[in-house]
Image: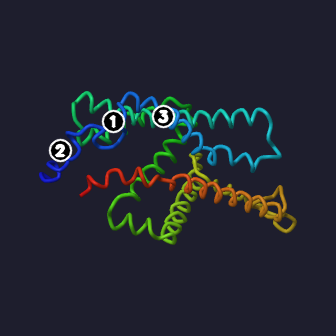
Amino acid sequence: MTRFSKIFVELIGARTCQELAIHPESCFVHCLKDIPLYLLSNFKYFVPICLLPLLIKLRSLNKNKLRHTFKYYAECSLVGAACGCGINALICFLRYIFGHFGYTTIVYWPSVIGGCLYNLGSERVKTFFETSVFQCITETFFLKRHNFVSHLIADSKYLQTYIFMICSALILQGKYLYGLKGFWFLQPNPKIPEVENTEHTTCQLHPKISCQRYLGHGMRKYFFLGLTLDVIKAMLSRISKSDSAKFKIYQK
């Protein structure tokens, strides 16, 4: 632990943002230049989450639904940009206040304080950030860590799929049993009511529509779910090699 503290102080703690190659310009100019970049990246990130579901509801769309959807999309993007800009600015600001990078001031406190900016959004947006966005960020951070478990999960598509299926089944079963209405990509089927005379009834799971139409709706829903997840993964995986290579010299 003492050796790690010495390495941190010598290689990171006493250096400036420019020396660590975080940004070449001053911190103030850097924060101003990053505002439009954060806005653009967040508007791009929330496209598949907020706008792709509109394709499923094309027949029932109206002006009111479109207005609420685009308002929700804009609010998610702006709140995400505020959190990102806040964290980015606090990293530089805390270094300026204390005169050096500390163990908690370089990542932890900027993330905690900046993450609290999600409270600027509505209840729906706050619930969405609490139950999905923060978990995605935590998962991405975990998969980038250098340990056996994270490498095992990151390198195995079959293991990722298996974990996703198990977690989805547990969450959906819990929602089904306790009637929860929290955020999740899928919604459990409603409880099947007991019918005394079952000879002249259709499927109890979908009494108002035919089996063919029910299967068609299900296939369409799962198709767009898979498409949404693939698009999100593609956006998250586009990490610049030049940015990731900046700190290699300090890992030696």
Q: Nearer the viewer, mark 3 or mark 2?
A: 2
Label ID, residue 91: 1
Q: Quadrant of residue 75?
A: top right
Instruction: Specify the quadrant that holds the C terminus.
Output: bottom left
Mark 1, residues whose alpha carbon is within 10 Å: few (<14), some, or many (≥20)?
Answer: many
Tell me: residue 173, above or below residue 118: below
Query: What amino acid type should be assigned to the residue bearing mark 3?
Result: Tyr
Mark 3, residues whose alpha carbon is within 10 Å: few (<14), some, or many (≥20)?
Answer: many
What separation in Å lies between label 1 and label 3 (alpha carbons)?
18 Å
Q: How many marks?
A: 3
Query: What amino acid type should be assigned to the residue bearing mark 1?
Result: Ile
Which element carries disc 2, helix, strand or loop? helix
Q: Quadrant of residue 103?
A: top left
Q: Residue 13 versus residue 169: which sits nearer the camera?
A: 13
Residue at image point 63% right, 37% down: 73
What separation in Å lies between label 1 and label 2 (alpha carbons)?
16 Å
Sequence-wise first label, 1 or 3: 1
Q: Residue 120 versus residue 7: which sits nearer the camera?
A: 7
Provide residue 199's location: percent of width, then percent of height: 85, 68
Find disc 3 in the rendering and name its residue.
118
Q: Residue 219 versus residue 142: which sits nearer the camera?
A: 142
Side of 59 relative to 98 (left or right): right
Query: What amino acid type should be assigned to the residue bearing mark 2?
Result: Val
Q: Pointers 1 and 3 in contact (CB under 8 A)?
A: no
Residue at image point 32% right, 37% down: 109
Sequence-wise first label, 1 or 2: 2
Residue at the extreme front: 24
Which element carries disc 1, helix, strand or loop? helix
